[in-house]
Image (spheres, helix red, strand yellow):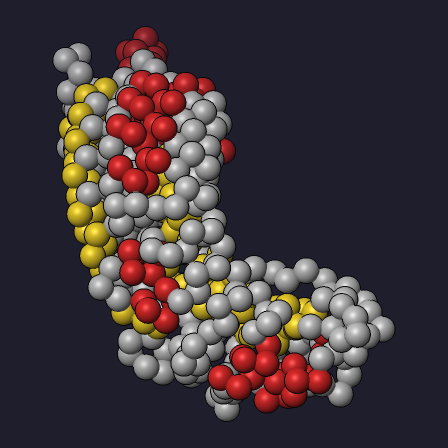
Amino acid sequence: TSPTPRTSPTPRTSPIPRSSSSPLDPKQLKALESLNIPTVKDPCNHRPSKSTPTAVVTCDAGSPFRLVTSISFTNCSSDLSISSTALRALSPSLTSLSFLNCPSLSPPPRLPESLHSFSAVSSFLRHRNGLSGIFLARLVNLTDLTVDSVPVSTSGLYVILGNMHDMVSLTISHANLSGNIPKSFHSNLTFIDLSDNLLKGSIPTSITLLPNLKSLNLSGNSISGDIPDGIGDLISLKNLSLASNKLSGPIPDSISSIPELTHLDLSGNQLNGTVPRFISKMKYLKHLNLANNAFHGVLPFNASFLKKLEVFKIGGNSDLCYNRTVLSSKMKLGIAPCDKHGLPLSPPPQKEDSSSDYDYNNEDESSEKKKEEHHGPNKVVLGVAIGLSSLVFLIIFLILLAKWCG
């Protein structure tokens, strides 16, 4: 099954530049010119248009000269080149640099170590290897790293993260990243997205030791083994997506200890056992996808719980069934009803169809249509029967009348 639909992350938006009467530092002004950024007007107030390169520049309000703090490139022209000379001139003050849809751009030999935020989305695709792990590892002051749809060549994620002690938000997705998940992470992390890579091995204990983590997305890899019990120690977690891996074993009871979990996607694994009843007690849960696993038994959810969910998928679990006295067949859950022994009455679809999410309004409409379709033929049969009976009665009456008159 495909992991939860996702969009490429948008580079962090720079703050609105503060107005200042001070001129821009002359060396940095020249650096911006070499990057095809217009400098006739104040480049710090430059906003992209159809007729100008799509670069957004943010500056401080310093004196006697203002300094560039952030540059965001979008849809770069094919003739753009990021020179080392320009980056050296900008490096004393530049803390944020992002590239979105710049596929023909070649990465510079080195980025300023002053950067706190670096983002590359669908960029640097001229070379097959994209970005190297060592290239990224030099950015030791980063708090925010986003690499999406850009190949990353490295022997392991630990090479990149080893010295990034201040990292808060980490996204390396669709990057052909291979190897195991590191056995240690720095405790400041609040966001981890390593989805759609080639990661393997088990989920390490290190991930369960991040008390500030709010979002964990490891979907679309080849991660195996059990979901660790320590996952329940992530008390700040709101989003947990482990879809489309090779995870096995039951859903750990410790997940019930995550108080504000809103998004839980465990679909497309080999998880087994029964679906835990505690899930229905998670009051903030809005998105629940358990499709395409090996769960068995009776689904322990009632209609009131399912109605509060915005997304619910459970199909593709052939040994799982629902209680017909608790849930209506109108919901089209993608699993069969249970017999009196708690076993599926008939084989359900083997794989969850993305269109099988139930919608109460649509279900009501479709059920009314089915009622009309179902009762329509019955009405016709009834009408024919009444007509024939009337005809027979008329014939008998005419025969009796003829005999009486004769």
| Residue 151, above or below 34 | above
* In-front residue for pair 132/270: 132
Q: Is residue 143 left or right of residue 147?
A: right
Residue 394 visible in rendering? no
Residue 351 position in % (x across, y down):
21, 43
| Residue 330, above or below 398 | below
Residue 270 position in % (x across, y down):
17, 38
Q: Quadrant of the C terminus?
A: top left
Toward the right, the furthest residue is 21
Residue 75 visible in rendering? yes
| Residue 134, above or below 89 | above
| Residue at horizontal 50 percent and vertical 72 percent from the top | 112
Residue 304 position in % (x across, y down):
45, 20
Quarter residue 396 falls in: top left
| Residue at horizontal 44 percent and vertical 45 percent from the top | 189
* In-front residue for pair 100/45: 45
| Residue at horizontal 59 percent and vertical 81 percent from the top | 89
Quarter residue 401 falls in: top left
Q: Is residue 18 left or right of residue 276?
A: right
Quarter residue 287 falls in: top left
* In-front residue for pair 132/222: 132
| Residue 286, above or below 382 | below
| Residue at horizontal 48 percent and vertical 59 percent from the top | 141
